[in-house]
Image (cartoon, helix red, strand yellow):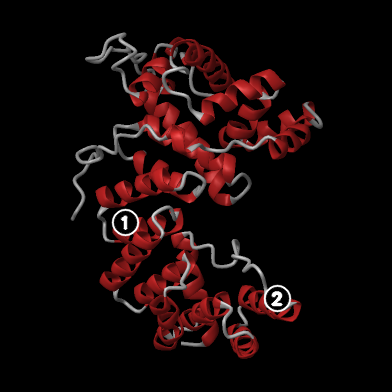
């Protein structure tokens, strides 16, 4: 196998696990000198272009000049496992971990090396060790969940991603993993919530477009596929009835939506979803916002007050429903999406630690029993 093909396979594996190998470099502070920082950036550029040999040469030179700069060792270790040289990668990464100076990305790098070399058991053990050291690292929970998912241990995978959301609400990839996993369960409400949080953070990527399409499908699942003439879903109060003190967050969201089913009686479209979600925001604010403050739903209020809610829903569902109609909408509403994008950059939706209302009861929610 050529070095380039090894690199390509490894890169595909990394992208499949959502590792931020190139997109989210951790900038060490402070750098020992501007020269070291320049060498680091040059090496990462070579990594991005696939020239791993040149990247390795620069990292090695930089380490000779600044042996205490941990990030250089970590990135060198990544280069080695991307080339398929797993033993050399371990030789570079293990001393950092043993020294106690490793950050969460170093534990992730070692776990990835172990996984690629075929030792998933040790990879899980390494991630667990990292989580014990960095219990608020969403990155490590994400990779642990992917290892479970790769082995079809879907229940454990989802539990781990939920742990990651609770521990590190700002790390957005766990929302994506949880949302797509909930799509195969009877808890579609969580797919809707987590999918929308994800696309508000990772806004314009192929994965975000995929999630927007998934969101439309999730609403169809929630209300039933009305385009095929199925009966309108009937809301049935659970054991909690109308007692706000005992209804769970999930039940509150689901019941609020289902009571508004007539709004989407003609089908799930961008337009009907915009109306549904505006009504949802009003009803939620009146009945549940005090009991369950939630950043995403507070953001709805901010969008409504700013006059951007309709544009936001077009951004969220327009292209997923019809790229042609989305283009027509933009032509007719020239400049509106640009104004919304600028507003969204200045007013980002940020999840809060207090947002976590998931009871993490995931055993038995899947339509088919997964192998453990």
| Residue 181: image location, x then y, percent | 36, 44
Among numbered discs 1 and 2, the one appearing first in the sequence: 2
Q: Is residue 270 visible?
A: no
| Residue 359: image location, x then y, percent | 29, 34
Residue that carries the numbered disc 2 in the rendered image:
37
Q: Whole-Å distance between the Cαs marked 1 and 2?
A: 37 Å
| Residue 151: image location, x then y, percent | 27, 61
Task: Reply above or below: 254 against 5.
Answer: above
Of the pair 364 and 358, the residue shown nearer to us: 358
| Quarter occupied by the C terminus | bottom left
Residue 66 as seen in the image, left or right of residue 11: right
Q: Is residue 88 visible?
A: yes
Task: Reply above or below: 120 against 39.
Answer: above
Of the pair 167 and 261, the residue shown nearer to us: 167
Picture disc at residue 149: 1
Mark 1 vs mark 2: give the one in front: 2
User: Which residue is depicted at the point 29% across and 39% down?
Assistant: 360
């Amino acid at each position: 196998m050529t070095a380039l093909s090894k690199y390509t396979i490894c890169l595909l594996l990394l992208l499949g696990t959502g590792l931020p190998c190139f997109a989210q470099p951790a900038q060490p502070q402070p750098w020992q000198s501007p020269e070291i920082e320049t060498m680091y950036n040059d090496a990462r550029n070579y990594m991005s272009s696939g020239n791993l040999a040149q990247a390795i040469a620069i990292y090695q030179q930089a380490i000779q000049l600044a042996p205490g700069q941990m990030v250089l060792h970590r990135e060198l270790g990544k280069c080695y496992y991307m080339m398929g040289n797993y033993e050399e990668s371990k030789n570079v990464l293990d001393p950092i971990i043993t020294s106690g100076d490793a950050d969460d990305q170093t534990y992730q790098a070692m776990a990835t090396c172990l996984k690629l070399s075929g030792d998933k058991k040790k990879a899980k053990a390494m991630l667990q060790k990292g989580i014990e050291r960095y219990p608020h690292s969403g990155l490590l929970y994400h990779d642990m969940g992917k290892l479970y998912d790769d082995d079809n241990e879907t229940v454990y995978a989802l539990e781990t991603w939920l742990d990651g959301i609770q521990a590190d609400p700002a790390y957005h990839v766990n929302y994506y993993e949880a949302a797509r996993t909930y799509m195969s369960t009877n808890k579609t409400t969580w797919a809707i919530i987590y999918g929308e949080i994800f696309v508000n953070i990772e806004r314009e990527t192929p994965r975000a477009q995929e999630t927007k399409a998934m969101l439309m499908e999730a609403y169809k699942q929630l209300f039933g596929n009305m385009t095929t003439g199925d009966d309108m879903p009937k809301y049935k109060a659970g054991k909690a009835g109308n007692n706000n003190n005992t209804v769970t967050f999930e039940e509150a969201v689901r019941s609020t939506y289902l009571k508004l089913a007539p709004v989407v009686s003609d089908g799930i479209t961008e337009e009907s979803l915009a109306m549904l979600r505006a009504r949802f925001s009003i009803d939620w604010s009146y009945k549940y916002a005090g009991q369950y403050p939630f950043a995403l739903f507070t953001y709805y209020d901010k969008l409504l007050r700013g006059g951007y809610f309709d544009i936001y829903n077009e951004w969220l569902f327009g292209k997923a429903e019809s790229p042609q109609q989305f283009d027509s909408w933009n032509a007719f509403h020239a400049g509106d999406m640009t104004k919304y994008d600028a507003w969204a950059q200045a007013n980002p939706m940020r999840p809060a630690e207090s947002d976590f209302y998931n009871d993490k009861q995931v055993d038995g929610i899947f339509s088919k029993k997964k192998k453990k």
